[in-house]
């Protein structure tokens, strides 16, 4: 079941992410870059909604994973769901009201627009609030489906829903009206349909109760501490990672923010390579630590870190070297490439450093040690806000990329140093040298040499450049893999034992 769910998650999340990524240039062609600034703000607030969802969603996921045929357990779970439904509906109404009553102020005082009237922007923001409210409730139902171990079904639903949502938006823009109001109105209509479908699936999956289910907030009392802790960590992580985007939505014009949002999307596309690795190794880390196998946790720690460096790190370095080609193939717009290529490179470097520390951060969580992560996030938040506020208006958007690099270097050096003083005490040197530096340098050096000596043989056409990019990436990936001793030996042993 674990492997099936894992594969389903990779395929479902990966295909959904690819669909969304490929549709972005189409949205820009119909709506313009300034409108994409609004869509970028829409995507940003959706990320922030995870803060509000975190406590309830995690509780539902955790509790419904315990479901059994016991009648009392089924009654308890249905009561818990009904209680959280009521609270989530109230929160959803508050979200809609906040966006409705603040949309006028936001359109006039927060956003700086050149081509949209305040009324158009205000209406779009009000519709956003409805979408956020509906998706807030829908995501809670999705947490129940995950807890019920029906992740294959959920990923099938997600894939088709995302495809219909994206393609439907394109059809609306192409045939009815290519304006922001129509775009978000479609999202409202579709969100209603998606919510109803998800709720229907949940109640069809749940075993029937033997008694009338009533709302009882007593079911939430034992879970308050757990849910609150998840909310705190989620909030701090969002503030550390997303606060620059909130600030820049105020400092920049919508057109500039559109370019920035596009750059962020391009730089973070490789994050889809991280999730599968973390999801595969984190449970194994927890199990090994619980069984007190110190030697095994060291092996798992280094192997997983080397996989991240080879797969994710290699992809990041490849895009850093080939940013303009990547952006041109994606957007097919030379002006956009010229405007954001340097910023994308800077954000890719920051994202590379951030991705490399995911395994050490997961190790801290596996040991049940959260205080260092919390302190690190607080430090980064305190540094990020004044730097973005005062330096970006002076030096431009690229400064935001430099700031992101410096803050991630803090995680990479200070946080990792203090982590290895408490856990994995003898593993710091090997992590820096063998798990990170060796595969990263090997990939980058091979890619550079291949570009230096062989690029001229492939010409300047797009087809030639794509073939060259594929060959250079493949060879660099193999060299990087071969330089990782633990990963290489583990792979050979796995092949021998098949």
Image (cartoon, rainbow, N blue to C red):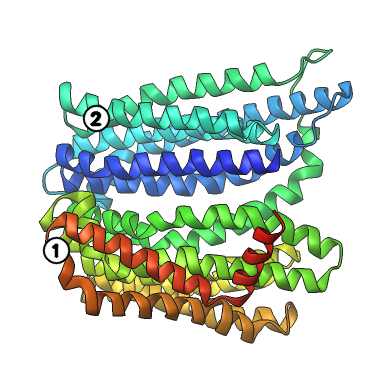
Quarter-wise, where is residue 217 in the image? Answer: top right
Task: Locate residue 469, reporting x and y percent.
Answer: 28, 63
Residue 200 vs 278, above or below: the answer is above
Q: Which quarter shows the N terminus?
A: top right
Instruction: Say few, some or many: other residues with alpha carbon within 10 Å of mark 2 (under 14 / 14 to 19 / 20 or more).
Output: some
Q: Is residue 403 left or right of residue 495?
A: left
**What residue is rendered at 23% in x and 38% in y?**
121
**Residue 229 visible within the image:** yes
Q: Secondary structure at mark 1?
A: helix
369 relative to 497, above or below: below
Question: Which of 321/468 is in front?
Answer: 468
Q: Residue at x 47, y 29 (%)?
A: 134
Q: Secondary structure under badge 2? A: helix
**Residue 389 seen in render:** no
Measured as percent of width and height from the top left, residue 448 is found at 30, 78
Residue 294 in which image quadrant: bottom right
Front-most of residues 343 and 52: 343
- 169 or 477, which lies in front? 477
Instruction: Answer left or right for 414 relative to 246.
Output: right
Residue 338 circle label: 1
Pointer 1 and pointer 2: residues touching (CB < 8 Å)?
Answer: no
Going 53% across and 65% down the picture, which residue do you hit?
308
Residue 40 relative to residue 140: left or right? left
**Sequence-earlier tag: 1 or 2:** 2
Measuring 43% from the left and 40% from the top, which residue is drawn there? 15
Residue 14 is left or right of residue 332, and the answer is right
Tell me the number on the disc at residue 170.
Answer: 2
């Amino acid at each position: 079941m674990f492997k099936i769910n894992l594969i389903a998650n990779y395929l479902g999340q990966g295909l959904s992410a690819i669909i969304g990524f490929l549709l972005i240039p189409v949205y820009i062609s119909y709506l313009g870059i300034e409108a994409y600034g609004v869509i970028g703000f829409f995507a940003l607030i959706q990320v922030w909604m995870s803060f509000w969802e975190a406590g309830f969603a995690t509780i539902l996921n955790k509790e419904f994973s315990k479901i059994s045929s016991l009648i009392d357990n089924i009654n308890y779970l249905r009561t818990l769901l009904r209680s959280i439904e009521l609270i989530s509906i109230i929160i959803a109404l508050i979200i809609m009201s906040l966006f409705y009553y603040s949309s006028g102020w936001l359109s006039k005082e927060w956003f700086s627009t050149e081509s949209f009237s305040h009324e158009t922007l205000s209406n779009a923001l009000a519709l956003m609030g409805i979408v956020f409210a509906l998706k807030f409730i829908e995501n809670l139902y999705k947490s129940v489906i995950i807890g019920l171990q029906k992740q294959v079904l959920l990923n099938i639903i997600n894939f088709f829903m995302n495809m219909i949502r994206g393609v439907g938006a394109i059809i609306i823009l192409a045939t009815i009206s290519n304006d922001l109001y129509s775009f978000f109105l479609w999202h409202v209509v579709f969100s209603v349909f998606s919510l109803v479908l998800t709720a229907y699936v949940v109640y069809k999956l749940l075993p029937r109760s033997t008694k009338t289910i009533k709302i009882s907030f007593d079911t939430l009392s034992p879970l308050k501490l757990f849910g609150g802790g998840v909310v705190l960590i989620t909030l701090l992580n969002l503030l550390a990672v997303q606060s620059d985007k909130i600030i820049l939505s105020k400092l920049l014009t919508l057109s500039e923010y559109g370019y920035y949002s596009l750059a962020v999307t391009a730089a973070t596309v490789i994050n889809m390579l991280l999730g599968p690795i973390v999801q595969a190794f984190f449970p194994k880390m927890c199990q090994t630590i619980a069984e007190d196998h110190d030697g095994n946790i060291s092996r798992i720690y280094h192997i997983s870190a080397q996989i991240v460096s080879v797969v994710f790190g290699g992809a990041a370095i490849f895009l850093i070297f080939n940013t303009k080609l990547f952006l041109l193939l994606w957007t097919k717009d030379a002006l956009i490439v010229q405007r954001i290529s340097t910023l994308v490179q800077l954000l890719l470097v920051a994202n590379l450093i951030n991705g490399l520390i995911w395994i050490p951060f997961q190790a801290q969580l596996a040991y049940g040690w959260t205080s260092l992560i919390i302190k690190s996030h607080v430090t980064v938040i305190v540094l990020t806000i004044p730097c973005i506020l005062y330096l970006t208006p002076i030096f431009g958007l690229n400064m935001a990329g430099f700031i992101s690099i410096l803050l991630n270097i803090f995680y990479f050096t200070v946080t990792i140093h203090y982590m290895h003083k408490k856990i994995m005490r003898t593993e710091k040197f090997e992590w820096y040298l063998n798990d990170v530096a060796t595969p990263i340098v090997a990939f980058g050096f091979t890619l550079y040499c291949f570009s230096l000596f062989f690029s001229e043989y492939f010409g300047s056409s797009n087809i030639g450049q794509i073939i060259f990019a594929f060959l250079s990436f493949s060879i660099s990936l193999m060299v990087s893999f071969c330089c990782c001793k633990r990963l290489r030996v583990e792979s050979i042993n796995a092949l021998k034992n098949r």
